[in-house]
Image: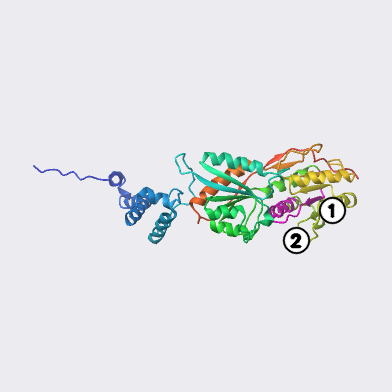
Amino acid sequence: MQESVKIPLSCAQTLTLVIACRLSDIRLRYPRQLHCRLAPSRMRSINQQLIAERLNLSPATVSRSLANHPAISADTRDKVKQLAAEMGYRTNPTRSVRRSRQSKPITVGVLIGVPAANVALATFPFVLQGIREHAEIEHVAVDICYQEPAALHPDAKRLPVFRHIRNGDWRGLILIYPFPEAAVDMIARKISTVAVSESYAHPFVDTIDTDDFAGIREMVHRLAAAGHRRIGYIAWRYPVGGHWSIRRFGGYVDGLFSLGLEFNPAWAHNVHKAAPNLDQAAIADVVAKQIREEGVTAWVCAADHQAYQLIQDLQARGLRVPADCSVTGFDGLEPPAKLPRVTSMRVPNEEIGTSAVARLLGRVMHPDSPRRKILVEGHPVEGETIAPPPRR
C-alpha cells in the first residue's frame, strides 16, 4: 500500500491551487499576480528586521526610529535612517499621527508676532484655543512666547525663542502672524516649523491657512448681487509680511473679472509695491473722495479690523455705511461698540490651530517630507454693511 505524504502549504499556495483548479484558463498567470500583490508588505517587514539585526536593535526600536519618535535618541534615529537609506528602505510620510497617553511627553513652542497686551480685534486667541485643545489630546505641552516681528532677526541670539531652541526645550514651533524670512529660515533649519496664515520660502515650513482667495471673491459677488458695479479694495501696509493681503487682492480681482466688472488700479490702495504707503487717515480721505467724485459705491477690506476702522473714519467724514457706501471685511470678528457688524467671512481659527498641531507632529516625525499647505474653508457672516448703491 502506497503511503500518502502531506505537504504543508502556505495560505497563498493553497489559494493559488484552488483558483488554478477552478479557473484553468488563468492558472499560469494568477500565481504571479498574487505574488506581486503580496510582495510589498513582506519586503517591508524583511527590511525592518534586517535593519534591526545589523544594528543589534529591536524591531520596535527600528520602527520608532524610522518614524522619528521622540522617545528614541537622536543618535539611534540617525543610525537607523542612514542604514535604511543605504538599503533602499522608504517610509510613508503621509500616514496620520496619533500619540497615545503612554507616549513620552514633548513640548512645542508657539511664537506670536504681537506684543502680549495687543489683543484688540486679534485672531490669535482663537488659534491658541485650538492649539491647546489638540495638544492636550496628543499629550503635548505648549510653551507660548510673544515676539515683536521686526525684532526677530538671526543676529538677535539673546531672544527667548533662540534660547529655547538652543537648549532643546522645544521639539517644534508654530508661528502665528508674519515674521522676517531670514529669521524663519534660520529657525526652520534647527527645528520643525509650521506657520499659521503666512507662507515662507523655506522648503520645510508648512502652512495652515484659510482659503482667503475664495473668501474675498465671495465678498465681491455679494456686493455685485446687491447692485454694486464700482468696487474698490483696501489693505494696510505692515512692517513685516502681509502676503495674505496680496492673496486677498487676487480674490478681489478674480471676483471682478469673473463678473465682467471694471477693475481700476486707482481704486486699490496699499497693494502695489511702488505705490505710496497710505496710513489709516489717508485711506479714509481718498476713499471719501472716490465715493463722492468717482461713484465708487462699495469697498472690500482685506480684514475686519481694517473694515471697522474705515467705517468709523468715514462716519467722521460725513459718510454712512451702508447708506452711502457698502463695506466688507474678512475674519468674522465681533464688532466694536456702536459699529454695525461688517459683512465678512468667518475664519475657523480654532480649526486652524488644531490643524497646526497635527501638522507639526507630522513634520517632527517626518522632517524631510514635502512641504504642505493646508487651507481651511471660511464661512460667510451676514452683516449689516451691504445695501444697494445709493441713487445719484
Closer to the camera in the image, 37 or 155: 155
Task: Identify residue for label 1.
Answer: 282
Element on which disc 1 rests: helix
Q: Amino acid at mark 2?
A: Lys
Q: Position of residue 109 (x, y in %)?
A: 57, 48
Q: Can residue 348 be seen here?
A: no
Which quadrant would the N terminus be assigned to in this image? Answer: top left
**Residue 215 part of the magenta-drawn span:** no
Element on which disc 2 rests: loop
Q: Can residue 255 be seen here?
A: yes
Crowdedness near tag 1: few (<14), some (14–19) or many (≥20) residues, C-alpha within 10 Å? few
Closer to the camera in the image, 106 or 326: 106
Res. 161 mark: none
Which quadrant would the C terminus be assigned to in this image? Answer: top right
The quadrant where residue 379 appears: top right
**Residue 234 part of the magenta-drawn span:** yes
Name which of mark 2 and mark 1 comes first in the sequence.
2
Closer to the camera in the image, 305 or 92: 305
What stretch of residues is rendered in magenta? 227-255
Which residue is at 62% across, 40% downward?
A: 129
Task: Identify residue for label 2.
Answer: 273
Q: Position of residue 107 (x, y in %)?
A: 53, 46
Q: Is residue 374 left or right of residue 73?
A: right
Q: Nearer the viewer, mark 2 or mark 1?
A: 1
The quadrant where residue 191 appears: bottom right
Crowdedness near tag 2: few (<14), some (14–19) or many (≥20) residues, C-alpha within 10 Å? few
Q: Amino acid at mark 1?
A: Ala
Q: Position of residue 178 (x, y in %)?
A: 66, 53
Q: Position of residue 27 (x, y in %)?
A: 30, 50
Which residue is at 47% across, 39% downward?
A: 101
